[in-house]
Amino acid sequence: MNRSVREVLLFHAGFGLLATGVVLATPAAQFGRWAMVLAIAYNLLLPLYAMLRGEHDWVGRWLFMLGVSALTVLPDWVRVSVTETLHFHDHGIDRIGGAVPLYFVGLWVMILFPVTLMADQGRSARYLVAALLGGLVFTAAEWMAGPLRL
């Protein structure tokens, strides 16, 4: 395992522990506020961690993934407002287009960033790694969305 993969796993394990503690300690009435705080914290801490650990190339990847994550709000909005096949719990947080909670702008970076970074390490099998790892992590994230009240 190369240094960059070790660093991304270390960062995400640490942030995952922090987020787990926050989620478990958060009353339902304040969940939206804390989900927003965690999304913002992650998107501030990741590039800061990258710079401190000498992973300067992460910043460009993070910016790109932040843009992709922000754009994922559009299909979610369509699924909520147009096709009515998706519903988000009301956590008292502002919603984009009256449909998608604001914290969703930065949530997918948490999955996309490590998956793409690890897939890039697999040089010849990068697409296979991205498909398998991305599918696994996406499935896990969707499965956890219910219990996490997302």
Image (spheres, rainbow, N blue to C red):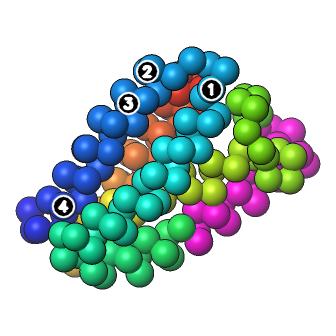
What secondary structure is marked by label 4? helix
What secondary structure is marked by label 3? helix
Q: Are marks 2 and 1 in contact (CB under 8 Å)?
A: no
Q: Can residue 130 be seen in this view?
A: no
Amino acid carrying label 4: it is: Glu
Task: Give me the disc on residue 30.
Answer: 1
Q: Estimate the spatial distance between the alpha carbons at disc 4 and disc 3, rounded to whole Å.
A: 20 Å
Front label number (2 vs 4): 2
Occupied quadrant, residue 105: bottom right
Residue at which label 3 appears? 20
Looking at the picture, tell me which residue is in the foreground, 6 or 27. 27
Residue 69 in the figure: left or right of residue 22: right
Amino acid carrying label 2: it is: Leu
The magenta region covers: 67-86
Q: Estimate the spatial distance between the alpha carbons at disc 1 and disc 3, rounded to whole Å.
A: 15 Å
Residue at which label 2 appears? 24
Q: Residue at x 57, y 18 (%)?
A: 27
Q: Do the residues labelled 1 and 3 touch (CB within 8 Å)?
A: no
